[in-house]
Image (tube, rainbow, N blue to C red):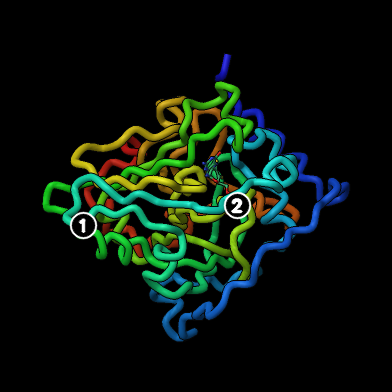
Amino acid sequence: MRAGILAASAVATGVAYRKLNPVARGEVKTARLEGVISAPAATNAATGFRVDEPETSFENITHYNNFYEFSTDKEGVAAAAADFDTKGWQVSVEGLVNQPKVFGLDDLLKISPPEERIYRMRCVEGWSMVIPWAGFSLSKLLGVVEPTGEAKFVAFETLLDPRRMPGQRSDVLNWPYVEGLRMDEAMHPLTILASGLYGRALPPQDGAPIRLVIPWKYGFKGIKSIVKIKLVAEQPRTSWSEYAPNEYGFYANVNPHVDHPRWSQATEQRIGESGRRPTLMFNGYEEQVGHLYAGMDLRKDF
Ligand code: MTE
């Protein structure tokens, strides 16, 4: 019986994030990223590129993770993923595009210099962080491959390799992990491909070498360790909505007014803080993205 995994961890998160009894924490050593660009402060309020809230510690961002390919124990992911080898990584960008291409990681990262994006991250389970990512807008990659007029959605896929990702030897999810966005969501400047955090290359537990970050959506949309990006005409399958369609929708926009069937989404536990804080509509990015959903029933398209 696979049901209820996120539920169980959500309950555990609410009461028992161990600020007072920290678990053993390993060192994380990834390369420093060169030339990370910070957006001019004057533009941050309008763009949402840099939220003005205390950043979650590097320790917590790298030792409290969801990455089921390695472990379903949030505090066990870092150790389980520590030796994940990303040498020779490639990302295939294909489907309804004029210029399909298999990018080596270096080629992909050359598309645009890394920009610092300090985003809120709200997990569907009810915890949140503030993470200083380094990355660039997905729209820049899409511009290079030139989507055709038929492309309406973008489908993403994580590596499938049970030898390197031991969690894939269990059937906790259907592997590989898959996600998707509507074209306008994918083209929004807040949607980034992240290759780093805190000015360093992404550690394995956070989705090395490249992952998606969509700050107004629940964290599960932020698919890690991507190997395939496919432009498609129909709404693609997504791992969590396939797992429990009544609990996890395709859109997964952060919404304090639409509860998860098994818990409230009105408040959240910011990791490293005590007490709960109100959850914001679209995770605080309503001004930037609210128009994408004008006229939609967000209870139906949750
Ligand atoms: N991507 C893959 N491939 N596998 C996963 O298990 N978990 C998701 C998302 N991306 C997940 C994934 C969930 S539920 C969340 S909340 C975020 O990653 C967590 O990202 P973080 O560990 O870097 O905070």
Query: Residue 29's spot in the image, x, y percent?
Result: 72, 62
Where is residue 227 shown, x and y percent of the image? 43, 46
Return the disc, 2 or 1, that comes first in the chain's sequence. 1
Residue 279 pos. (x, y %): 54, 52
Extreme left residue here? 149
Q: Nearer the viewer, residue 8 or 34?
A: 34
- Which of the image's four quarters has the N terminus? top right
Secondary structure of residue under mark 1: loop
The amino acid type, in three-letter code, at marker 2 is: Asp
Tell me the quarter of the picture where residue 234 sits.
top left
Q: Percent x, y for residue 63?
A: 72, 50
Residue extending farthest right:
21
Q: Quadrant of ligand 1?
A: top right
Q: Using the rendered view, name the quadrant where residue 201 is placed.
A: bottom right
Drawn side of residue 238 relative to residue 9, left or right: left
* Up-down relation of residue 30 to residue 80 (above or below): below
What crowding class fits label 1: few (fewer than 14 Cα within 10 Å), some (14-19), or many (20 or more)? some
Nearer the observer: mark 2 or 1; the answer is: 1
The residues tagged by marks 2 and 1 sit, at their Cα atoms, a distance apart of 29 Å
What amino acid type is highlighted by mark number 1? Gln
Is ligand 1 closer than 8 angstroms to the Cβ of mark 2?
Answer: yes
User: Which residue, given by chain and number where applicable, does mark 1 sit on?
Assistant: 99
What is the secondary structure assignment of the residue under circle 2? helix
In the image: residue 168, left or right of residue 144: right
Label 1 near ligand 1 (CB < 8 Å) = no
Task: Determine the residue positioned at 65% across, 67% down.
Answer: 31
Residue 218 in view, yes or no = no
Residue 156 versus residue 99 in the image, above or below = above
Q: Which residue is mark 2?
A: 206
Q: Nearer the viewer, residue 265 or 130?
A: 130
Which numbered dot is residue 265?
Answer: none
Quarter of the picture containing the C terminus is top left
